[in-house]
Image (cartoon, rainbow, N blue to C red):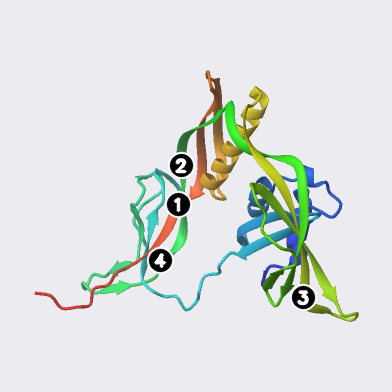
Amino acid sequence: NKDVKSADIKASLKQIGIYEGVKISNIDPEVARNELLLKRSDLSWAAINIEGSKITVDVVETKKPDATDTAPSNLISTDDGIIKKIEVKHGVSMVKVGDTVESGQLLVSGVKEYDDLSVEFEKSMGNIYAEVNYEFTVSQPFKVTEYVKTGEKQTKRLLNVFGLNIPLYFGSQIGSYEATPYFEKVSSGQSYLPISIIKKTFYKTQKITHTLSYKTALLRCEDRVQNKITDLVNGGEIVNKQITEERQNESVVLKVKLTCIKDITFEEKLRLDTSNSN
């Protein structure tokens, strides 16, 4: 992070239940990631990784509009919907409130035409909000095949010098396993050296096939539904949500109907052909 303060990110993490002393078992990294992005519009991407007894949070800040980017462009619709609000700063609006639009439709044109037949090109800027409907289905089979920890584990060490990992053990790890790294910086007393010890704990896993309880299958299904809703709404406002639950012979199924108000603009650069043609 560069412009977004670390203290602000930590404060947002605390609001969603991630702080020093919290139980790791209480944290779902994927859910927490989505909650963090919903709270902070100044972050466009995040990853929350549990590493032993520590958590690292990688972020990408929301890119600010480049004042030097003046290339002519249009604003195109990302979804089918009904226009509810128009905020155009630059460009010519091609739609009005109440219009029904389709995905890929031109919303704001970067081409201005004048009465004297002259034409001016500009970079379109603005937001157009529409009511968008989604329908999708998510299913979770009761019978699943996955890797589980057997209880066997082994800890090995690596020496990291200027980014180069040097194994402090012989041979390689055999079989299927999950590895959890833990980093220890090396200090000279007054300051840290560019050297660290990486302890990797290898947890042996085995592939098993088992049957989920109805409750567990439903919870997995609900998590996937929530992640999909977050991606679709993309910072917009949910105005209606209906989820229908069905139990089939071999799976649980959730059918979702969703209505939201969201910005449906996508910037598309204009291709100006300045070559002469006959």
The residue labelled by disc 1 is 264
Q: Earlier in the sequence, mark 3 or mark 4?
A: 4
Residue type pointed to by label 1: Ile
Can residue 87 be seen in the rendering of this structure? Answer: no
The residue labelled by disc 4 is 124
Q: Position of residue 56 (x, y in %)?
A: 73, 60
How far apart in space, not on screen, are marks 4 and 1 (Cα)?
14 Å
Q: Secondary structure at mark 1?
A: loop
Q: Position of residue 246 (x, y in %)?
A: 54, 21
Disc marking residue 195: 3
Between disc 4 and disc 1, the foreground one is: 1
Q: Disc 1 vs disc 2: Cβ atoms closer than 8 Å? A: yes
Q: Secondary structure at mark 2?
A: strand
Q: Quadrant of residue 26?
A: top right
Residue at 21%, 73% (x, y): give it. 116
Residue type pointed to by label 2: Val
Q: Is residue 87 left or right of residue 108?
A: right
Q: Disc 4 vs disc 1: Cβ atoms closer than 8 Å? A: no
Toward the right, the furthest residue is 189
Q: Is residue 214 left or right of residue 74?
A: right
Between disc 3 and disc 1, the foreground one is: 3
Q: Earlier in the sequence, mark 1 or mark 2?
A: 2
Badge 1: residue crowd in 10 Å (few <14, some 14–19, many ≥20): many
Number of residue marks: 4
The residue labelled by disc 2 is 132
Quick one: 225 or 278, which is closer to the camera? 225
Q: Secondary structure at mark 4?
A: loop
Q: Position of residue 234 (x, y in %)?
A: 54, 50
Q: Is residue 233 left or right of residue 276?
A: right
Between disc 3 and disc 4, the foreground one is: 3
Residue at 42%, 58% (x, y): give it. 266
Q: Earlier in the sequence, mark 4 or mark 1?
A: 4
